[in-house]
Image: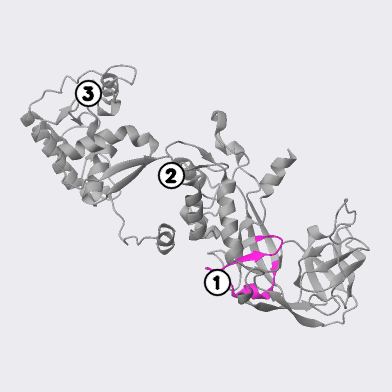
Amino acid sequence: AGWADEVLRCKADDAPFFASDYFDQIYACALTLIHAGKAYVCDLTAEQTDEYRGAPDRPGRPSPFRDRSVEENLHLLQQMRAGAFPDGARTLRAKIDPHHPNVWLRDPVLYRIRHTAHHHTGDAWCIYPMYDFAHCLSDSIEDITHSICTLEFEVHRPLYDWLLQHLAVPSPRPHQYEFARLSLTYTLMSKRKLMQLVTEGTVSGWDDPRMPTISGLRRRGVTAVALRQFAIHVGVTKYNALTDVAVLEHAIREDLNTRAQRRLGVLRPLKVVITNLPDGHTENLPAANHPLDPALGTRDLPFSREIYIEQDDFTEVPPPKFFRLKPGGEVRLKYAYIIKCEEVVKNADGTIAELRCTADLDSKTGGATSSRKIKGTIHWVSAAHAIAAEVRLYDRLFTEPEPEADGRDFRTCLNPHSLEVVTARLEPALATARPDERFQLERLAYIALDSTSTAGRPAFNRVITLKDTWAKEAAKG
């Protein structure tokens, strides 16, 4: 609740509200409508009710049971309440206008019979109020002033107002406001379809960091500030539109760039031995915690004879404009020295076991003789001091901007690479990371401690990459 409070900037009550808590009051309102001649019990089946109601382009007809007396309607509703009739045998309908241009005002159903146990009230009831009836009354009981709905409920608002008016709800009455629902590219927002992802095991649960749920975003490491900034940017509109998920991702990056302290980590380690340093050599190098905020100071970064670099930062056959490490080439280690690759040591199967390099000991970053310029700079960690940690590389759940376009099954667009788990090597400062902290792994991504992390088995989530890699791929065509 605390994180939701921070997102909404309000204090949520600890107790959830259930419309079923008001079933007695809603039933009393149904009796009031019958007494006023504004509701009647109807014996039409669901199919017949739809036929009589008509459609926007087809006029409605009055139910043959519309003119029952108040006494008969009261008696029948009480029998419905007592369980005297089977499911679907009768309904209670509002007596408005069977010919109204708005189909939702053509004597809508208020109550139906269902002999099914309720998750909150058990077997106490066998008649249940319809959404439109319970909606306005629950709002009134809870002293709601602004009832927020999506655009498809705009045609329901006249019924919302009619019920409050004819039940003499005192002012100030709640008012329904409609706005466009949020739709994002590469995302599903339907709860029913998200449930399908959960029940079929496509994701680990509602709080899976790939899910567009508050719990999923929170677990991934997205902050309340980022969500508020996104909401402000998107705004409230009266027309349905598809928002590029890159807008949300930009808000996340903007927030994390400001708050996240910098750290070094290697996702796919490649061992490097610096041969002109003695065995057991260790030194501490100063590293800025945040380049944009000097007040955050520096930390000591251990450096030793054996380090890890990223596998992608070395290639034996470099393409044009490759400025990272290659045989005979030089590269600067962030916060440390310039090194030169002297030898590539391979395993029996031809894979690279380690690189042997020499360091220009006069090139230490920040030193008096560190002015030699090198085009490439890469990150690293000390092999002797780094911690092993599981890093979960989350990405978009779908490969297509509109997973359900042209009526296709959204499951055919699932991204097989939406989660990759690697055993990374991280600088030792991350051993004391807290759940409320966010970090930037320099040159890689923003990360956050996962809720499943333990002291003996740290686990981090990739909140988001530093750059929009999807836009880059799209530009390639």
Decide: few, some or many residues near mark 1? Use Cα within 10 Å; few <14, some 14-19, many ≥20: few
Q: Is residue 330 above or below residue 33?
A: below
Q: Give the quarter of the figure containing the C terminus.
A: top right
Q: Check disc 2 and report its element: helix, strand or loop.
A: loop
| Residue behind mark 2 | 236
- Mark yes or no: residue 346 visible: yes
> Residue 63 placed where, x, y %?
19, 21
Quadrant of the image occupied by residue 453: bottom right
Which amino acid is tagged 3? Leu
In the rendered structure, find residue 44 and report the number of the disc placed on it.
3
Tell me the CA gap for discs 2 and 1: 35 Å
Q: Give the quarter of the figure containing the N terminus.
A: bottom left
Q: Check disc 3 and report its element: helix, strand or loop.
A: loop
Which amino acid is tagged 2? Val
Q: Residue furthest left?
A: 71
Taking 282 as reference, is 462 left or right? left
Tell me the CA gap for discs 2 and 3: 41 Å
For the residues labelled 2 and 3, say whether their Cβ atoms are less than 8 Å apart. no
> Looking at the image, which is closer to me, 341 or 201?
341
Q: Which residues are magenta?
A: 425-445
> Residue 409 placed where, x, y %?
55, 33
Magenta-span inclusion, residue 49: no
Quadrant of the image occupied by residue 83: top left
